[in-house]
Each structure stands twice: as structure tokens, then as C-alpha cells.
Image: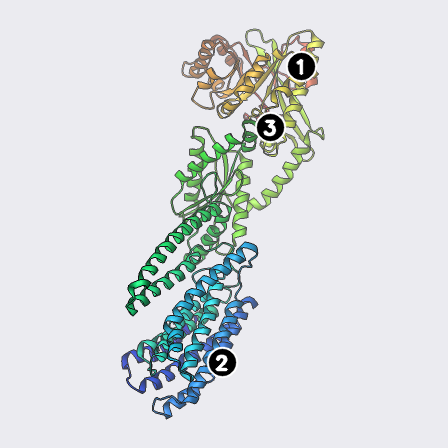
Amino acid sequence: MVRTARWIRAHGLLMIIGLAAMATVGVRIVTDPQGDDRSAEFFRSYLLTSILTTTFCWIAAFRGPAAARRPWRWIAIAFTAMLLPQPYSVVMAATHEGKLPLSGILAALTGRLAWAPLVLVGLLMFPMKSLTGRARTRFIADLTTVIGGGFVVSWYFQLGPALQNGRIGPDALIVIGFPVTDLALIFGVCALLMRNGLTSWRGPLPLFLAGLITYLAGDVTYAHLIGNGPMTWTTPLSVTLNGADLIMATAAAMQIMRPGEGTRPKDQEQSKIAYLPYVALLAGYVLLLVAAAREGNLYPWAGLAVGIIVMTGAVVLRQIVAMRENHGLVVRDHLTGLANRLSVAPALEAAVRRHRETGVASAVLVIDLNGFKKINDTLGHEAGDALLVTFAEVLRSAVRGVDVAARVGGDEFVVVLDRPGDADQALAVAQRILDRAAGSPTPIRAAIGVVLTDPETDVVTVRHRADMAMYAAKRAGLGRPELWHPGLESATGAADTFDAEILAATAAGQLRLAYQPIVTLATGEITGVEALVRWEHPERGTLLPDAFIAAAERTGAIDDLGLWVLETATRQTRHWQDEFGRRLYVSVNLSPYQLPSPGLTDAVLGTLAVTGLNPHDLVLELTESALVHESEGAAILEALRRADIRIAVDDFGTGYSSLRYLTRLPIDILKLDRCFVSELNGEPQGSAVAEAVIRLAQALHLDTVAEGIEVPAQATELTLLGYRSGQGYHYARPLSAEALTSVLRVSGGQPDGETVGMPVQDDVVAGLMGDPQA
């Protein structure tokens, strides 16, 4: 019972309209009165529908915001003006046996003629898009075309016959007055449609316009009948006019139930409305042919009309093609062919609206390409454009036809997934995009944020959440999408603060270096060092590279940080060479974000010139994945190699299975990752990878360094396999410059294995500027 009562309250107005429809339209169709009874029956039924429509319009005029109330107030006044004379007309028709006397005609005519301009004011009160310049000129031209088409219809069916008959009196006033007011209403309807007054094709306003157009059709029929003889209220005409009233009453009921709709014009033009002038033009030409056929004057008018129609049709076709092309230019990205920023807002609005109506969520993906700016700066805009086109093809292949994929900025994309199912399905689509982008001929790396629509959240908030998730994915740098959750709100603020701190860390003198010795395995003699950066954060203490390198790369601080590490490490190494009179090299990690920089070679050589270190004593380390992804940096590596700087592959064996880059790129040293060193146990299966790497290095004439040596047995087995150099806790932890100076001074360059270095963590740190242990 409770649910039934709730349903009746929610749909009570529509039930009242349904009952009124049965009492008017239904009864009229069933009884189909004849003769003079037609007029009396029409005025009785029309009085009922007018009372209903007027009442609902007045209720709607006091519901919702001011922008929604204002037009409905004028519409209510209009229906009141038409309603007031109707009781008199009903009484006159009833007392004169269905024949309406002159006073009744004038009363009805006065109400009808007052109704139209008041409705026009109400239509013009609905919010519409403001127009300036060319847009206003185009609007005026289109509106004139449509009104011209309406005038052709009025002339043929109403004005022309009335003027030709030359009759004057109430009937003629109706014949002339109705078309004039109808043209005014056509003006209002077209102005509303062409100036984007409809927020959607669902809602009270479209339904009201449908009722109004139905009423205009009844007006044309009424004026045509009265202009061609005595007026008879036929059943089709009565049903049309009563039905129009009921449709407009239903629109008012919808406004009462949903008072917030129709208060804001659409920003984007509706392409279907643009065809309205062409429809009016077609209607005029059709009437021209009909008139020529009815008059029997096929010569000359029919041939001239056909020729004009063909010529105009060709011009219209050309204009339609141009209009569609222009529309494509407006809503499509000219480079990628994807939708553009203008198309995203309607797609997001539609997704949120569907969620509210159906309860099923859609998903929004915000995508940002990594390293795009460097590609533009180093390889040129043509290379950047080619990358964008490639990624656009990836998006097309990864999403469905019902989804919207758009490029909204330089390297920023948005995808609106239409009801993908759930968050897991949306994340699966995002991961598919990442995987296909990474597997494209030019590997593309990206960060993707994912958010599901929320019926209680507006479009701006949904987009903001997707942006936050994307930035979280970019900060994580794990190559997987990030789903928005409330915790990202606080995390984003903390990340912004951290980014600002890393930007100032180098200038604030908060960075320092640790040095881990690289030794000759056969003798234990120190032959080189690896420089490892540490950040002495004023609040968090000592931070290892994995805690801040991603932020440095994201903010661009990596360039200053990397050059500081290079200068500090090479100056210290040169100092050791001078103090101890021995050859010592330094190994410095290079970020893949530094590699494509066109000024990298000059910066490195300039630093060596300042610090005085021999280029052969500098080794630049890059991770295996960086070398594979940054193949465009091959020219820079070649330039460094020609300067006698050596290149090492760090963490070899943990990256990509393809070894093609070993023969294509100028590489000197392979550094065996510590995970393979930890597997050495004296058994063949434990040393399989380490043995394969040393054989590969020997075949390619490359040097090797084994990382992460922790026990003597590992050093012994590596020596037997053929490795010459290594580093790890067995020899020394990362040391400060002062501590390593003491080791070099006291032990003659041979660490005793008990040296205590800087604080480190036990697991290997995949930071770009060095590992805490090796």
C-alpha cells in the first residue's frame, strides 16, 4: 500500500491528464457528433482542457529557480487570457443550438489572438545562448528562411484564399489574424531551437514545443476550413486542438515534477537543428509544385519549379556537405582524428545523466604521455606528431565504438567508457591501452587515471578526480592505471608539497653522495666507485633514491640533480687520484629522462673539463629498460663514447629479453644484477644466468661487474666463472667520501669487508641515481 500511495503521488498529475484525455478526446472519437452538435461539443471539451492546462501552467510558474519560473509565468498568463472568454462561448453555443453567434465568435477570437503574443514572450524568456557577430547574422538568415517557409504555408492555405474571396467580417479576421500570430509563434519556436534553448530532447520544454506545433497545425486547418465556407468543427480538428492542449498540460506537469530543468542553454550547437532552414525551403518548393499541379498550369510553372528545385537542391547539398565538414573541424582533432575538447564535455554530461537515469556507472580515463615534451624538444614536432597519431590508433583499437576517445591537449587524452560494467573492467581497458602503447613500433609510456561516474557528482568533479588519479599513476611510475579513491585527495596535496621540496633540494644543499667500492675480484683491490645519491630531508631524514627520483623526473628537477651528482662525484674522484696517485674510475647513474636531452653531451664534457677528470675514468650507467625505450638517445651515447666515456648497462638481465640493443648501442660494461648473484650456490642451475651473461660479454668484448656480492663463496664462484670486478656488502657498504678516503689511506685500497657505511635498506632500490647496495 505504501509503494502504491507513493506511486500515485509521483504520477498523480499525469493520471489527471489521462482522465481528461478520455473525457475529451476519447469521448469525441467515440461519439463523433454531427451537425450543429459538433460546435457545442467542441467548446465544452476545449473548456475542460484549457482549464487543466492553465492550472498546471500556473503551478509550474511557482516551481523551481527563477530562470525556470519566469517563462512559465508568461505561458500561464497566455492560457488564462484564452480561457477567460471560453465560458461565454460555451454558453452561447449551448443556447443557440450549437450555432455560435457573433458575440461568441468575437469573444473566442479575442482570447485566441491575445494568447499567441503572450506565449511568444514566454518562449523568448527561456534561457538561450547569446549571439554576436557572424553567429547573429547566421541566426537571422536561418530564422528568416524558416519564417519564409511558414509564410508560404500560411499563404497557400490561409491568407491567399481569404484575400482572393475578398470577404470581411469575423471569419476573415480569423483567417488573417491566425496566420499572423502563428508566424509569430513560429518565430519564437525557431529562435529557441536555433539559439540552443533546449538542454536536451527530453524534458518539459521539448514536449511543450511539440504541443505548440500541434496547435499550429490545427490553426492552419481551422483557418483553411473557415476561409472556404461555413465552419464545421470536425472530429479530427477537435481532437487535434484538444490533444495539443493536453500535450502542453503534460509539459507543465513535467515542469512541476522536475522544476530544475531548462534553466541553462547548451554550449554546443545541435547539428540536427541546423537542417531546419532546409526543411522550410523544401516545404516551400513542394507547395509550389502542388499548386502548379492543382491549377493545371504545368506550363510554364511546373518546369520552372522543377528546375529551381534541382538547382537549389544542389546548392543545399553542397552547403550540407560543407556544414558537416565544418562540424567535423569543430568537434574533431585535426591531427589524430579523435574527438577534441569540445566533444568531451557533452560526452561526460551524457555519462553522468545516464548514471542518474539507469543507475549504471560509466568510466572516465584521463591519459598523459610520458616524456612527450622531450621528444618534441629533441627530435622535433614532426616526431611528436607521429607519436600522437600512433597513440590515437592505439586508443581506437582498445575501446569500443560506443566509447568516446578524445585528445584534449598536447599529450593529454580522455576516454569516456559507456557503462563498462565495473571498476575492474574499466581498469582492464586502461591496462590494455598501456600494454598496446608499450608494444607499438615506437614504445609509448603513459599514465592513466580512472574514475567511475557518480550520480551525486557533477561533471567538473568527475573530471577533477580522473586528473588526480592520473597524477597518482604518474607519481607511482609503475606502468599501471590508478583508480580514484578518496585517499587521493590528501595524497595529492602531500605530493605537491614533496614536488616543491625536491625542486629546491639541490639549491638548498640537502643532497650528498655515498660511494660503494668496485673491486677486482681476484685481488680485492679497489679500482672504481659507484656514486649513490642521498637526500637529507629536513623532516623525513635520509631518503634513498627510490623515494624521490620519480618526483625529480616528474618535476624536471632531475636535470639539476643529475648534473650535481656528476660534478660532485667526478671532482671527488679526481681528488682521490691526486691524493693517492692511482687510477680510479667513478660510475654515475644516468636517468632516462636525461638521455634524450640535446645538451647532455656538452654538459658532461663541460663538467669533466671543470673537475679535471679524464673522460675514460667516467662510466655512465643506464638501466636496461631505459636503453630499450630511449633508442633515440643512441646518437648521444655515440657522442659520449667518442669522447672516451664508457657506458654501462645496470641491472642487466632484469629488463627486456631482446638483446638487439647490445649490438646497436655503444656499450662497454654489463653489470650483473644482484638477484642472479644471490642464486649462486655452487650448483650449475644456480650459476646458469651468471655464466650465460659472462659468455655473452666475452663474445661481444664487454667488461662485466657483478653486483650484490654478500659472502665470500659468491665472490669465489664469480671469479671461477670469469668475472673480473664486483661490488657488494662483502667488500663494503656505501661510504661517505671521508670514510672511503680512510679506507684508501689505511688499507692501500683494499676494503676489509667490515666497513660500516651510510644507512641502507636491505632490498635493492631501483632508483635511477644508484642503488643502496650493489
Q: Earlier in the sequence, mark 3 or mark 1?
A: 3
Figure quadrant of residue 231:
bottom left
The disc at residue 81 is: 2
Asked if the residue under mark 2 is in contact with the one under mark 1, i.e. CB atoms within 8 Å, the reply is no
The residue sitting at the front extreme is 300
- One can see residue 752 in this view: no
Q: Earlier in the sequence, mark 1 or mark 2?
A: 2
Q: Where is residue 344 shown, x and y percent of the image?
A: 49, 48
Q: How many marks?
A: 3
The disc at residue 573 is: 1
Looking at the image, which is closer to me, 309 or 639? 309
Q: CA distance from mark 3 to mark 1?
A: 21 Å
Q: Residue at x 34, y 56 (%)?
A: 307
Q: CA distance from mark 1 to mark 2?
A: 98 Å
Amino acid residing under circle 3: Pro
Q: Where is residue 206 shown, x and y percent of the image?
A: 43, 65
Amino acid residing under circle 1: Thr
Q: Earlier in the sequence, mark 2 or mark 3?
A: 2
Amino acid residing under circle 2: Ala
Q: Is residue 376 above or below residue 60?
A: above
For mark 3, does the 10 Å Cα neighbourhood hold few (<14), some (14 to 19), or many (20 or more) residues?
A: many
For mark 2, does the 10 Å Cα neighbourhood hold few (<14), some (14 to 19), or many (20 or more) residues?
A: many
Q: Where is residue 602 shown, x and y percent of the image?
A: 63, 20
